[in-house]
Image (cartoon, rainbow, N blue to C red):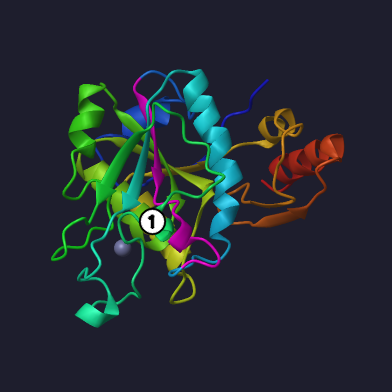
Amino acid sequence: MVPPLDSSQSGCPTDHGAGSMRARALQPGPGDALVVVDVQNDFLPGGALAVPAGDAVVPVLNRYIGEFERRRLPVFATRDWHPPRHCSFREQGGPWPPHCIAGTRGAEFARDLALPASARLVSKAARAEADAYSGFEGTDLASQMRQLQCTRVFIGGLATDYCVRASALDARAEGFEVVVLEDAIRAVDVHPGDGQRALQDLAMRGARTGARGAPWHWRRCSKPAPTRIAYRPCGSIAVILQVRRAACVRRWTLMAAATFGSC
Ligand SMILES: [Zn+2]
């Protein structure tokens, strides 16, 4: 038994795709693609532009990647791929410290991110004079997805309030249905609440948010897993569970309580 993904939906009356989205289960299937956004060393703790707890997305994304792989669905991975004097760097008048310089360790994907050999890499902002938060901006991501007959994209990665937000908005603008994987994203929160506001913006544009329910975690508990899981069963109530890897049944029980008890 696999419960439906917990979700919230847009109330945007102009969203022409909302009707079909409501009818479509949040289970990956034909026509779906996974986009892993910028899970690179420089965005992880210790990196040049670290997202708080950014590394927490890695094991969660690995589970989504595994699921898409098992279903033979396409997996894309975007990456910042900047030249050394990129316009987004402070020395060039931009807002950020130098980060994700092409070919450096900081630009590599997180060591533990289990991208399959079939993953399609999408490099963005590779020219000095232009930045791109979105994986769709200045890339062929949309056309690749159309060639693969994708109609819906599941998005996770870093960071909620920048590249995940921009990628999800562009995906909607390109006509794709969007599911933001709420358990596989983390925000920078330069201004407190930026991450939540980003999710609200996305909902207004017709993106759905979702996270896996308890039995899915339970099934995977024999593998190495994070001991701390942030879980939002209702999209608004955050339940932080501190569990030990060995306590699989207990974890299942606790998370089931979070899923069904809080909603
Ligand atoms: Zn960048």
Location of residue 117 in the rendering, given as x and y in whole percent from the top left corner: 42, 28
Residue 205 visible to an observer of this rendering: no
Residue 56 vs residue 3, the one in the foreground: 56
Secondary structure of the residue carrying tag 1 is helix
Location of residue 175 in the rendering, given as x and y in whole percent from the top left corner: 22, 36
Compared across the picture, whether 227 is left or right of 23 comes to right
The range drawn in magenta is 31-47
Residue 167 vs residue 226, the one in the foreground: 226
Location of residue 179 in the rendering, given as x and y in whole percent from the top left corner: 41, 39
Name the kind of residue labelled 1 in the image. Answer: Ala
Figure check: 128 above or below 180: below
Figure check: 79 above or below 94: above
Q: Quadrant of ligand 1?
A: bottom left
Q: Which residue is mark 1?
A: 107
Task: Determine which quarter of the picture holds residue 103.
Answer: bottom left
Which residue is found at the position 40% from the left and 62% from the top? 161
Compared across the picture, whether 95 is left or right of 22 comes to left
Residue 32 vs residue 204, the one in the foreground: 32
Location of residue 81 in the rendering, given as x and y in whole percent from the top left corner: 28, 55
